[in-house]
Amino acid sequence: MTLRAVKGMNDILPDEVGRWQHLESVLRRRIELHGYAEIRTPVLESTELFVRSLGETTEVVEKQMFILERSGESLALRPEGTAPVVRAFVSHSLHAKAPIHKLYYLGPMFRAEQPQRGRYRQFHQAGCELVGDPGPGCDAEMIDMLVGMLRELGIENFKVLVNSLGGAGTRARFRDALAAHLAPRKAELSEHSQKRLLDNPLRILDSKDPRDQKAIADAPSILDLLEPDDLAHWDGLRRALDALGTPYEVDAKLVRGLDYYTRTLFEIQGAGGELGTQNALLGGGRYDGMIQDLGGPSMPAIGFAMGLERILLAMHEQRPAARSTCFVAPIGERASYEALRVGRELREHGIVAEVDTRGGKLKNLIRRADSLGARLCVVIGDTELDRGIVLLKDLMAHSQEEVARGDIAGRALALLQTTPVKAEGSA
Ligand code: AMP
């Protein structure tokens, strides 16, 4: 029997890795321009961390965690990145070092969901956490940074949804109002939501079940129930977004799965149809209570997480990278040692070099260079060795020239900076 990868977990093969690396480098650069520093935490954490921070009645905690028991301890593969970052923040007392912290992470997350396009059991998230600023200016700046990132990645077709969940007081008022609205409709709700009505009615707003959707269609809006401080924060967020010219839509039904959110909440959805039903490219919000709940000081914080697989699905295919490899083709044993030295020298100049010392006829060597997608080919035989030169072929321009041994790297660099133009009379 052939062994397969675990359900919902994908290999990323070498020909796809280029797109991942491009995406990761754009994200890192943009995020670092905003002053975030990377933090790396373990993929395993105590199960309790997620139960306490995400909330016992959330979908992720109830159904999706990969849990393993070891020496009587319950450990979970991290289903998200915020709780581990906050755990690290608290356990290393980072709060004592500065009033504001900007941290980012990038790595695999694990959720036992039913796999489909854009939904996997191992997936990758990039996320930022900004601790110490109560907003709403920094909330708007984070959303604007994300809009800029998506545009840089060539994703133009998306919707930015924003909402406010208020603080504890607003939440309690809204929970009561929602429960009062839904109680007479209890029998029309899905079985799952009937249970939620008692322990966590806000969750019902997340439900995709048509019965629940119907019952919540004319439910009260949390935005009408915001307490004065929450309302001032919400108005401030919209004013800052307007000042930045960041596009957004208000969606009072946005609650986003996890219990820890307070005040600002946002989600960016792909609208180009590439993602099917899994159209949330990224989501985030404020979690002003979590640091204290996990044993740290009372500090406000906001963060987001972006799913890299979904971003890649929404990104247009890029043109393949320009061919930039230099293939070194020695003919004969004596030349092969020179080729190894030439290869080393090219790499020292930042040129990707492939030395092929397997020998063979020139025609076959050139064929190998072509199949590797090389742009240049350095040919060295006994004659060239004796004359202190090499033959430098531009495989795309179909041209060649003799180059003095000492000038190879410089000439190769110069050629790689040009767009190949086919030499006259070449095939
Ligand atoms: P969440 O942590 O649920 O707020 O998710 C944040 C982002 O992570 C989503 O918008 C998706 O882009 C991505 N994401 C969440 N779950 C999955 C999954 N199972 N497979 C792929 N991407 C996911």
Image: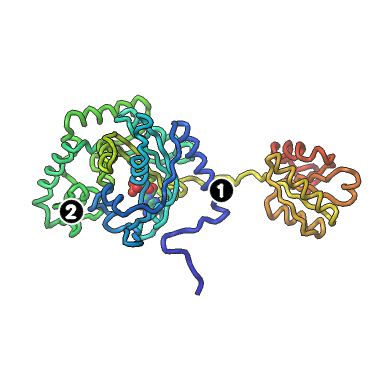
Labels in figure, total: 2
Question: In the drawing, does residue 387 fall left or right of residue 396?
Answer: right
Residue 126 vertical placement versus 186 (above, below)? above
Residue beneath the point at 34% across and 57% down: 75
Q: Is residue 254 visible?
A: no
Label 2 CA crowd tier, 10 Å (few <14, some 14–19, many 20+): some
Question: In the drawing, does residue 120 fall left or right of residue 410?
Answer: left
Residue 333 vertical placement versus 296 (above, below)? below
Asked if ligand 1 lies within 8 A of label 1, the reply is no
SS under mark 1? helix
Residue beneath the point at 48% across and 45% down: 315
Question: In the drawing, does residue 141 fall left or right of residue 217?
Answer: right
Number of the label disc, if any, that sits on residue 196? 2
SS under mark 2? helix
| Amino acid, disc 2 | Arg
Front one among 68 and 365: 68
Q: Position of residue 8 (x, y in %)?
A: 41, 60
**To which quarter of the image does residue 303 belong?**
top left
The residue under label 1 is 18
Question: In the drawing, does residue 339 fall left or right of residue 94?
Answer: right
Residue beneath the point at 20% across and 29% down: 229
Q: Is residue 81 visible?
A: yes
Q: Position of residue 242 (x, y in %)?
A: 33, 27
Front one among 377 and 98: 98
Q: Residue furthest left?
A: 184
Q: Residue furthest front?
A: 71
